[in-house]
Amino acid sequence: MASIFSRIVAGEIPCYRIAENNDFLAFLDINPLAKGHALVIPKKETDYIFNIEDEELAAMMVFAKKVGLAIEKTIPCKRIGVTVIGLEVPHAHIHLIPINSIFDMDFSKTKLALSPEELEEIRSKIVANL
Ligand code: 5GP
């Protein structure tokens, strides 16, 4: 069965889309740790990030860098934390999270509950900074 992220790629499930090219898609995490928390995924479904071919993985990180810099311009923070977990959704993804301290990368924290309007506002500001 297609992963939830493949269904997003296919347009079957909506997302707050930040950027895409032929191979990758970036969108806001629906249950963010911080405002601007985004995910970068390969459009081709692969569960484990280290099963992605070298060249594609390198390109994915370059794509994530571009998105991360736009998030950093948009959301006041010390830097963008970059991490891969992948225990919930079996479709490789890089988390990009605006952080001010190590505690902002704590995935056991309660997630933010942002309204659709707030998510859309964040999304459009990030897109404007791309
Ligand atoms: P992980 O697999 O890295 O442990 O976590 C998966 C991440 O994907 C979580 O941060 C979760 O909030 C996010 N997520 C799960 N389902 C959806 C979805 O349908 N849409 C979006 N935008 N994010 C999702």
Image (cartoon, rainbow, N blue to C red):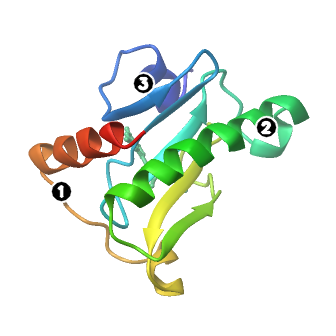
Three-letter amino acid code at the position of disc 1:
Leu
Q: Which label was assigned to residue 57?
A: 2
**Screen quadrant of the C terminus:** top left
Cβ–Cβ under 8 Å for marks 1 and 2: no
Q: Amino acid at mark 3?
A: Ile
Residue kind at label 2, given as amino acid type: Leu
Residue 8, numbered label: 3
Q: Position of residue 6 (x, y in %)?
A: 52, 23
Of the numbered discs 3 and 1, the one sitting upstream in the chain is 3
Rendered position, 8 above or below 48: above
Q: Which mark is residue 2?
A: none
**Mark 2 vs ligand 1: CB under 8 Å?**
no
Q: Secondary structure at mark 3?
A: helix
Residue 16: image quadrant is: top left
Q: In what element is the residue under mark 2?
A: helix
| Mark before the other along the chain sequence, 1 or 2 | 2
Q: Is mark 3 within 8 Å of ligand 1?
A: yes
Lateral position of residue 90 relative to residue 58, left or right: left
**Rendered residue at 35%/59% (across/down):** 32
Query: Can you identify the residue that label 1 sits on?
Result: 114
Image quadrant where one finds the N terminus:
top right
